[in-house]
Image (tube, helix red, strand yellow):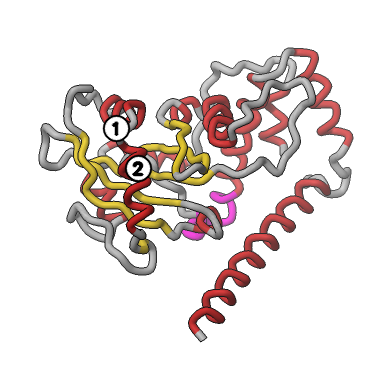
Amino acid sequence: MHDYQGAFAPNFDENRDLEEPEPVRRVAKKAATASWKSLAAEDLEGTNPTLPIGKCFWPLSQQEKRDIEKLLADKEIHRLATRLRSRDDNEDVKLVDAAYWVKGCSSLGRSRYAVLLHVDGNEEDYCLLDLKEAVKAAAPHAARARMPSDQAERVVEGARHLSPYLGGRMLAAKLDGSSVFVRELMPQDRKIEVERLTSQEAIDVAGFLAAVVGRAHGRQMDAGARKEWRRELERTRSKSLNAPGWLWTSLVELLADHERGYLDHCRELALEGA
């Protein structure tokens, strides 16, 4: 909360670089030299250009394959696959493999697919796309805010504000009538493995990420709105506990929803098997 709230200080400067904690620097250094092979070894369990069917990747139905092939024929998707690493827009983009992607809570009861493409010009120039179904936002938005009616466009627009680097390589699309957002997974898209951090390192990383979110929020406010929001944040903080009650409640409810959804999903599969 301290680092998040710092983004709304009177001397707020969105151009000032945030000091990265050591765990973030380690991940960034490792990602700087990452290649397709390192991405494949991490996400695909090998360097062969296929998606290994098993625990993480499930086979598609014929209809799902046709829907994905139709989506990939879109010119915008073609440009997404070619523009990110200075590829030629005229290069052929071919579908190599596709599968349903079992990946955390975002694949529970929703459409999520991994799509492996080959971009002509280099035998190792592959492209891994992540297709995720967009759902209605749980959080409210300001009454006067202009919000895209299409859920995937809303997600992409939000990503462009929160993380321009990520949002700039995302697209909104339609897959079998459902709104999906598409992004290319880069070798540099590495996550910080929190379970390997010490308690202090985890606190430092949490503060850094909170500052990133605070800065994204602050960019969308004028000086008056930032002052009002800072006053509201101070008002809801307990003098004896740094974490405000709404933050604790939100996180506990989120964790409970995730666990309940996962266990219900497992039970339904077990009943189907029986």
Q: Residue at x 23, y 44 (%)?
A: 95
Q: Mark 2 points at which residue?
A: 129
Q: Mark 1 points at which residue?
A: 81
Q: In this view, does 13 lie above or below 44?
A: above
Comparing 95 with 118, the one in front is: 95
Looking at the image, residue 213 sits to the left or right of residue 112; the answer is right
Looking at the image, residue 91 sits to the left or right of residue 150; the answer is left
Q: Report if the CB atoms under discs 2 and 1 are less than 8 Å apart.
A: yes
Comparing 144 with 222, the one in front is: 144
Q: Where is residue 78 in the image (x, y as percent from the top left)?
A: 29, 30
Q: What element carries label 1?
A: helix
Q: Is mark 2 on a helix, strand or loop?
A: strand
The quarter of the rendered structure image containing the N terminus is top right
- Label 2 Cα crowd, 10 Å radius (few <14 / some 14-19 / many 20+): many
Residue bounds of the magenta highlight: 194-202
Q: In which quarter of the image is residue 152?
A: top right
Looking at the image, residue 246 sits to the left or right of residue 87; the answer is right
- Label 1 Cα crowd, 10 Å radius (few <14 / some 14-19 / many 20+): many
Assign the magenta stretch its main secondary structure: helix
Q: Where is residue 41 in the image (x, y as percent from the top left)?
A: 26, 55
Q: Residue at x 86, y 39 (%)?
A: 236
Q: In which quarter of the image is residue 92?
A: top left
Q: Earlier in the sequence, mark 2 or mark 1?
A: 1
Q: Where is residue 274 in the image (x, y as percent from the top left)?
A: 51, 86
Q: Residue at x 67, y 40 (%)?
A: 137
